[in-house]
Amino acid sequence: MDFIKNTVDERVSHVYLDSGKSNAINQQMLEELKETIVTAQVDPAIEGLILHGKSGFFSAGLDLIALYAYNEEEVRRFWHTFMDFVRTFVAFDKPAVAAISGHSPAGGCVLAICCDYRVMADGDYIIGLNEVPVGIIVPASIFQLYGFWLGEAAAYRYLLEGKLFKPQEALQAGLVDEVVDARSIRTAAGRQLAKYTQYERNTWRRSKRNMRQSVIDAFEADQEDTIEAILQQWWSPATRSIIKSIIDNLKR
């Protein structure tokens, strides 16, 4: 795999995002992530999963530079892959912990909220869903996933303003569960995963699925109309202009 590194230690799958400096999400990274999640789900030797980023970045979200250059067919394929991946990760019934090692906006935040617990490194970092200011339509299923952790009213307000949180703000809002020194993030994530895996596995996993069922149903519903709306807005001059400005800033 080119963008995902995976090691198994004491029955825990350690999944490392490895896509450039900022772990931006492109088509191949999504495909590799889904394959890794599916493998962890069906492998009886794996009891849980920890998702790791890099120092300073968990994931900067969608790789806008790559996506901006995609043609119509490639963009359509990407969004279908993205929604299918999130559906797969939301339905993953083994324990999953996100070790958020730095910035985690937009798609990076989506990766984190698929997990059962989020440990974030303290520092001058941001996390949250800022799709609306970027010109990307928020799917109802993503809103439901965000609201699962924040409550629907708070998720509604934060999504419409594209709010990004610093670590302590995210902790207060319930978006992350723990803020630690960056040097302690792996230890903290491992400690929490061990709390989950100490229980009888079928009881824990069935309970997780029961409590997530409404969110799972939202992603298992037909996403075609949502994706079509996203694609239509993606190609609009207004959104293209916003993304082009972001890309120009990134390159500078």
Image (cartoon, rainbow, N blue to C red):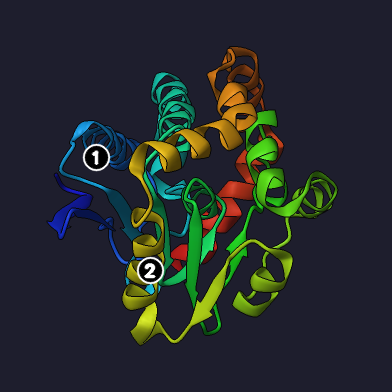
Amino acid tagged 1: Ala
Residue 189 bears which disc, if any?
A: 2
Q: Is residue 168 left or right of residue 98?
A: right
Q: Position of residue 65 (x, y in %)?
A: 42, 49
Residue occupying image coordinates x 67% and y 21%: 229
Percent x, y for residue 138? 68, 36
The disc at residue 40 is: 1
Residue at 16% from the left image edge and 48% from the top image edge = 2
Report the residue at 72% width, 54% height from top. 150
Confirm whether residue 178 shows in the render. Answer: yes
The reply, left or right, for residue 54 in relation to residue 226 is left
State which quadrant residue 174 falls in.
bottom right
Residue 24 visible here? no
Q: Is residue 106 above or below residue 163?
A: above
On screen, residue 6 above or below 252 = above
Give the SS element for disc 2.
helix
